[in-house]
C-alpha cells in the first residue's frame, strides 16, 4: 500500500530534467524520508525504456533508504513531457515500473510553479535551455503551451539565444548585418580570433555541438557592456517572457487578480539586471496585480507538493515538506 512505518501514506517525487534528476520520498505528514540524485532524463535521445532504466537507480536508493518496496503515489514532473499525449504515454510507462499505487506525470515546468506557491495558483515561466510557461488554479484548470520549438511558436531559451547571437555575429563579421561586439566576444569565449574560425570549428565539430549553449551568458555579458544588438536580444527575451505570462494569466482569468508570476530556469535565475528589469516593467504595465518572484527552491519540492496535494495532505504537512528544502537549501 506504500505506507511508512508510522502508517502514513507516501509520495515518490520525481523532478527529471535533461541534465539531472532529483527524487525524494515524502510521507503525508510532510517528512522527507529520503532523497537522491541521478542523471538526465532524455526519452527523445535514448528512448522511453532506457530513460526509465536510468531513473530506476536513484529510485531504488530512495525506496531502500525509506524502507519501502513501493509508495502510495508517484508524482513525476518530467522534461520532454511537453504535450498531454506525451504525459499520458510516460505515465503508462512509469506505472509499469510498479513504484507506486498511482501515478501522475506532468511537464517539469509545473514543478517550478508548485514549488513557488503556497497553493496551486499562479503562472510560471521557465527559461533554461528552452522556454516554457504554465499556469494553474486550485480547481484543476491549467494553461500551457506546446513548447517544442519554433514549430510551436517559441522563441528564447539559452539555446535559442545562443543561436540568435551566432546569427547576428556571423552577419556582422561578413558585412551583411549590423556591427556588433558579439563578432568578437563569441569566438573569444572559445579562444578563437574570428567568427570565421568559430563557424568552421562548430561546423566541423571541433567544438562539440552541445557547447553552443555556453554562448548565452556571453550574450548577456556583451549586452551589459552596452552592445545594442546584444541588448536588443535581451529585450526581446523580456518581451517573450512577458507575453507568455500575460497570455497564461488571461486564459485562467487571473489577469485582474493578485496572482504570482514565478520565474525559473538558469537564464531567469541568473540575475541579469536588464532582463529582470525588463520583465518586471513589462508585466507591471500589462498585469499590474501580478506578483513577480524568482523561484530558488529545487523543483523536486514542487513535485512533492503536487503529490501531497493529490493525497489531500494538510497545510502543516505541506509546510514541513517545504521547510526541508527551503531551510536546508540542499538535500539532507
Image (spheres, rainbow, N blue to C red):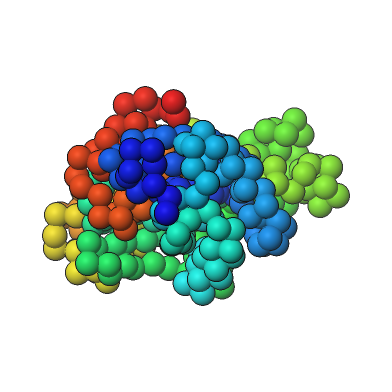
Quadrant of the image containing the C terminus = top left
Quadrant of the image containing the N terminus = bottom left
Q: Can the viewer see residue 324?
A: yes
Give the residue drawn at x 19%, y 44%. 315
Give the residue drawn at x 64%, y 43%. 57
Q: Nearer the viewer, residue 233 or 208?
A: 208
Q: Where residue 180 appears, x then y in whole percent? A: 58, 44
Q: In screen coordinates, is 41 left or right of 324?
A: right
The image quadrant that residue 277 belongs to is: top left
The image quadrant that residue 98 belongs to is: bottom right
Q: In screen coordinates, is 91 left or right of 279?
A: right
Q: Nearer the viewer, residue 41 or 30?
A: 30
Q: Can the viewer see residue 157?
A: no
Count of numbered labels shown in the rendering: 0
Residue 55's place in the image compared with 214, above or below, is below
Q: Nearer the viewer, residue 167 or 261?
A: 261
Q: Nearer the viewer, residue 86 or 49?
A: 49
Give the residue drawn at x 33%, y 68%. 143
Q: Where residue 201 appears, x then y in whole percent? A: 81, 44
Q: In screen coordinates, is 287 left or right of 164?
A: left
The image quadrant that residue 244 belongs to is: bottom left
Q: Where residue 256 appears, x then y in whole percent? A: 14, 63
Residue 319's place in the image compared with 177, above or below, is above
Q: Where residue 234 appears, x then y in whole percent? A: 45, 48
Q: In screen coordinates, is 47 left or right of 321?
A: right
Give the residue drawn at x 78%, y 42%. 207
Amino acid at each position: 500500500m506504500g505506507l511508512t512505518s508510522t502508517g502514513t501514506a507516501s509520495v515518490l517525487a520525481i523532478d527529471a530534467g535533461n541534465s539531472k534528476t532529483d527524487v525524494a520520498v515524502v510521507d503525508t505528514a510532510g517528512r522527507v524520508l529520503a532523497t537522491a540524485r541521478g542523471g538526465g532524463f532524455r526519452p527523445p535521445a535514448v528512448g522511453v525504456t532506457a530513460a526509465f532504466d536510468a531513473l530506476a537507480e536513484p529510485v531504488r536508493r530512495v525506496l531502500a533508504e525509506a524502507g519501502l518496496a513501493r509508495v502510495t503515489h508517484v508524482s513525476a514532473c518530467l522534461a520532454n513531457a511537453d504535450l498531454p499525449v506525451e504525459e499520458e504515454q510516460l505515465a503508462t510507462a512509469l506505472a509499469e515500473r510498479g513504484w507506486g499505487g498511482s501515478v501522475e506525470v506532468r511537464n517539469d515546468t509545473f514543478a517550478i510553479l508548485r514549488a513557488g506557491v503556497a497553493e496551486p495558483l499562479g503562472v510560471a515561466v521557465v527559461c533554461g535551455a528552452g522556454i516554457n510557461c504554465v499556469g494553474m488554479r486550485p480547481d484543476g484548470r491549467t494553461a500551457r503551451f506546446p513548447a517544442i520549438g519554433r514549430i510551436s511558436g517559441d522563441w528564447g531559451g539559452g539555446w535559442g539565444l545562443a543561436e540568435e547571437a551566432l546569427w547576428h555575429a556571423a552577419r556582422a563579421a561578413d558585412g551583411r548585418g549590423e556591427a556588433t561586439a558579439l563578432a568578437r566576444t563569441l569566438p573569444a569565449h572559445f579562444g578563437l580570433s574570428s567568427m570565421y574560425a568559430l563557424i568552421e570549428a562548430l561546423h566541423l565539430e571541433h567544438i562539440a555541438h552541445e557547447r553552443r549553449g555556453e554562448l548565452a551568458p556571453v550574450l548577456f555579458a556583451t549586452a551589459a557592456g552596452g552592445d545594442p544588438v546584444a541588448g536588443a536580444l535581451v529585450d526581446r527575451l523580456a518581451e517573450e517572457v512577458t507575453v507568455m505570462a500575460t497570455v497564461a494569466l488571461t486564459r485562467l482569468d487571473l489577469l485582474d487578480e493578485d496572482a504570482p508570476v514565478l520565474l525559473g530556469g538558469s537564464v531567469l535565475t541568473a540575475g541579469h539586471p536588464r532582463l529582470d528589469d525588463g520583465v518586471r516593467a513589462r508585466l507591471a504595465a500589462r498585469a499590474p496585480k501580478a506578483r513577480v518572484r524568482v523561484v530558488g527552491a529545487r523543483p523536486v519540492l514542487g513535485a512533492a507538493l503536487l503529490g501531497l496535494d493529490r493525497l489531500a495532505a494538510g497545510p502543516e504537512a505541506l509546510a514541513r515538506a517545504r521547510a526541508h528544502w527551503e531551510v536546508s537549501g540542499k538535500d539532507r
